[in-house]
Amino acid sequence: MPAAVGAHVYKNALVTIATIQYANQVTKARLVPDQPVQTLRTLVPDGVLQDVDSPVWTFELAGLQINVTGGLAKALRDANGGELEVILQPKVGTAQATATFTIVALMPEFGGEQGNWLTQDLSLPVIGQPVFGTSA
C-alpha cells in the first residue's frame, strides 16, 4: 500500500485573524470539536441506539505574547469579548484545506517568568460551525 497523499508536517501555515496574518507569532493553531454521543443500550443483544450531537468548537491558540501594535496579544486584548473572523490554513498554497470561523476574543496572558519568552496559550470559543473549504 502506498503512503497516504496529503500528509504533511504542520509548518508554513496561515493564521489570519481579523484580516491580519499572525502565523509568525503562533506555535499552535487548531480547531477542536466537542461532539457528544448519546448511547442507549436495551436488553436485547443488538439493542443499541446512538445519537450524535452537533459539535461545539474551540480554537486553541498558543504562541508569542506580543503586547505592542501588530501583536496578537494586543489585538485580542483590544477586542476582548468581541467577535473576530479567523481563517486557518494548515499549509500555504493553492488548493489547500481551509477553515473559516468566528471566535470570541478573550483576554490573553500578560507577563511571564524571568529568562523565558513571553508566551500565551488560549482556548477561544467558536461561534457556530466552521466553514471548511479550499484555498484559491
Image (cartoon, grey):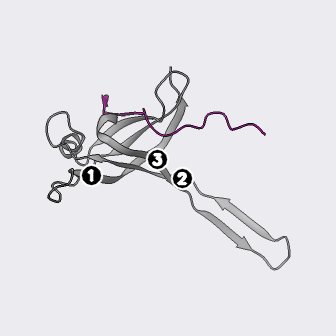
Front-lying residue, 120 or 79: 120
> Where does the image place residue 110, in percent across and percent down from the top left?
17, 54
Asked if disc 1 and disc 2 are in contact, CB closer than 8 Å, the reply is no
Is disc 1 placed on a helix, strand or loop? strand
Indicate which disc residue 120 carries: 1
Decide: few, some or many residues near mark 1? Use Cα within 10 Å; few <14, some 14-19, many ≥20. many
Residue at position x 70%, y 63% in the image = 50
Inspect the image, locate mark 2, and give the three-letter code of the amino acid beneath it.
Answer: Pro
Mark 3 vs mark 1, foreground winner is 1
Which residue corresponds to mark 3? 31
Relative placement, left or right, of 130 versus 84 is: right
Is disc 3 placed on a helix, strand or loop? strand
Residue at position x 49%, y 40% in the image = 130
Principal SS element in the magenta part?
A: loop
Indicate which disc residue 55 carries: 2
| Distance Cα–Cα, label 1 vs label 2 | 26 Å
In the picture shown, does residue 59 fall above or below 4?
Answer: below
Mark 3 vs mark 2, foreground winner is 3
| Distance Cα–Cα, label 3 vs label 2 | 11 Å
Front-lying residue, 126 or 13: 13
Specify start and end residues of the magenta stretch as a single range: 1-22
Residue 13 drawn in magenta: yes
> Where does the image place residue 24, in percent across and percent down from the top left?
31, 35
